[in-house]
Image (cartoon, rainbow, N blue to C red):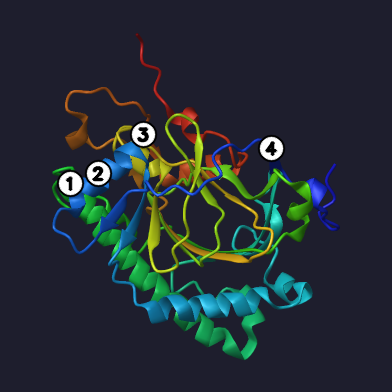
Amino acid sequence: MLVLSKPTIEQYSDIRNCIPSTLCSGIPLIDLSKPDSGHLIVKACEEFGFFKVINHGVPMEFITNLEAKAVRFFSLPLSEKEKAGPAAPLGYGNKSIGLNGDIGWVEYLLLTTNPDASSQSFLSVFGENQEKFRSALNDYVSAVRKMGCEILEQMADGLKLQPRNVFSKLLMDKQSDSVFRLNHYPPCPELQALNDTNMIGFGEHTDPQIISLLRSNNTSGLQISLRDGSWISVPPDQNSFFINVGDSLQVMTNGRFQSVRHRVLANSMKSRVSMIYFGGPPLSEKIAPLPSLMKGERSLYKEFTWFEYKKTAFNLRLADNRLVNFERIIAS
């Protein structure tokens, strides 16, 4: 049994013989200012479920301002940070990920993106800087949501869907169940003594929402799984964003796009800070393959509401395949 109150390096899941540790330069790169972005986004979603975007339109001052406040928070004594927890699911979490036994070399803040609800009591840990943090958070989330909607609308253009806001309207809905996560992966000097052993910062998983927009500092650690099951390391780039296809988008495209399985490995010497916007639909939204994309195909998935899927995901382990519970059995 793991004793989380006194964590040691032996307690954490590690990956031995992790072959593809070299950085991969083949990650799809999308310039959002180019007129051909739509079909390139579709191609990246079909082949990787993951891509990098430049010329994203998110002001750098919004990025650096929020990151600085995140770094300041994670630099507080543990006793102070714990006043913002435990995560249930919103709030501060340390090493424990969810309620089903997953742990990692990570601490985090999970927040709602609804500005009317961002007065959660745990933000009082910021003291007199609470309003400054909330303002920085709202500026950043607003800009990243706008970018996410642009990506989804260009994606719709690439798929020749009408209306072009068929995906983005779910993020713009006032009832959108989107969340925002700040992750901090502290340095792990003990790894130097473990030679070829890589320790998990955040275990392999897919994101359940529609789309995830990630930005991190220049510390490596992020890896994605390719269709053949091999893992590649994603070169860090603090000036760009990385985009994940989520489970809900996989269903809406009837499997044409596949949610990307990804993980984060701990770094022996450098701290990694990442900021992720998870674009989700309203809780009551029905998720199913879009009829306009079916083209006579049979649906691979049963219809479900986002609330139903979220509840299922909450009760499973991080690495579990959540969609298997909603797949249709197709007779051969």
**Identity, as a three-letter code, of the amino acid under mark 3:** Glu
Numbered badge on residue 303: 3
CA gap between label 3 and label 4 equals 39 Å
Q: Residues within 10 Å of mark 4 (few under 14, many from 20)?
A: few
Relative to 220, is 258 on the left or the right? left
> Could you tell which of marks 4 and 1 lies nearer the N-terminus?
4
Relative to 92, is 22 on the left or the right? left
Is label 4 in a helix, a strand or a loop?
loop
> Could you tell which of marks 3 and 1 lies nearer the N-terminus?
1
Residue that badge 2 annotates: 42
Give the mark toward the camera: 3 or 2.
Answer: 2
> Does residue 237 lie above or below 41 as drawn?
below
Give the mark toward the camera: 3 or 1.
Answer: 1
The residue that appears at 25% across and 41% down in the rendered structure is 43
> Does residue 309 lie above or below 55 as drawn?
above
> Does residue 73 lie above or below 199 as drawn?
below
Residue 300: which quarter of the image? Answer: top left
The residue that appears at 33% across and 32% down in the rendered structure is 255
Kindly indicate whether the residue at mark 4 contacts the one at mark 3 (C-beta within 8 angstroms): no
Residue that badge 1 annotates: 158
